[in-house]
Amino acid sequence: KAGVTQTPRYLIKTRGQQVTLSCSPISGHRSVSWYQQTPGQGLQFLFEYFSETQRNKGNFPGRFSGRQFSNSRSEMNVSTLELGDSALYLCASRKDRGQSYEQYFGPGTRLTVT
Amino acid sequence: KQEVTQIPAALSVPEGENLVLNCSFTDSAIYNLQWFRQDPGKGLTSLLLIQSSQREQTSGRLNASLDKSSGRSTLYIAASQPGDSATYLCAVLGGSSNTGKLIFGQGTTLQVKP
């Protein structure tokens, strides 16, 4: 069974540009969450999508947005990039059925903003 | 507001030692708690998940306990090996299953010396 996949794995962008990251959840998983990881702030929740709807949102500016497609794949977009957006972006999926609600993470996308 | 704290921030032990990593959380109304492992620059690997109604979970040399009333969890690693060197993160899921938002601690970076 394939795990969570994220593309691209590495990105270098310039300030002011925008970027789109993609996440494919484990087959059968309907919930996809996104996290930002930086050395200073650790892992912070960005947002969660379930059945193509944003179900939860963290404390990030509106420059950060996302969406989910009917096949549960998700994308996140960051517009007008800032140096502080340099981070490892992780997505996680879970089945949202049953009792455990265990979450599984992808390998991440390393974004560098210059 | 839920806050998760992990102590110590870093730990160095000789191979073969048994060790305990600590995680505390401020709001006992959690749905579950997960322990993850992260290798440098990589994604998160789920190690153990404990439901709020459970006291402990075991997988191989790993044992995680949960005391919800006191807001504490521990991860016990038996007979540590150099391959256990990584950052260990604990994360709690809020009191409802209707969210994928995990709140993470800052992690404990473990080094096991041969």
Image (tube, helix red, strand yellow):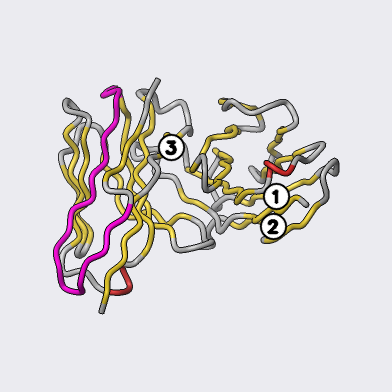
Q: Amino acid at mark 3?
A: Arg
Q: Tell me which chain the residue with mark 1 is part of.
A: A
The residue lying furthest to the bottom in this view is B114
The residue lying furthest to the right in this view is A17
Q: Amino acid at mark 2?
A: Thr
Mark 3 or 1: the one toward you: 1
Residue B29 in sight: yes
**If the image is split into quadrants, where does the C terminus of chain B sit?**
bottom left
Q: Which residue shows up at 65% across the image and 50% down it?
A: A23
- Cβ–Cβ below 8 Å for labels 2 and 3? no
Q: CA distance from mark 2 to mark 3?
A: 26 Å
On the image, the x and y values in percent for residue A54 come to 63, 27
Q: Quadrant of residue B37?
A: bottom left
Main SS type for the magenta part? strand
Q: Quadrant of residue A5?
A: bottom right
Residue A97 has which mark? 3
Task: List the residue tagged with mark 2.
Answer: A7
Judge from the rendering whether residue A71 lies leftward or rightward of residue B64; answer left or right: right
Q: Quadrant of residue B92?
A: top left
Give, as a single range, the part of the protein colored magenta. B10-29
Q: Is residue A12 magenta?
A: no
Q: Name the one closer to the observer, B20 or A5.
A: B20
On the image, the x and y values in percent for residue B29 come to 29, 22
Q: CA distance from mark 3 to mark 1?
A: 23 Å
Reply above or below: B70 against B49. above
Q: Which of disc 3 and disc 2 is earlier in sequence?
A: 2
Q: Which residue shows up at 48% across the image and 32% down it?
A: B101
Q: Which residue shows up at 32% across the image and 30% down it?
A: B31
Residue A22 has which mark? 1
Secondary structure under the numbered disc 1 in the rendered image: strand
Q: Tell me which chain the residue with mark 2 is part of.
A: A
Q: Which of disc 1 and disc 3 is earlier in sequence?
A: 1
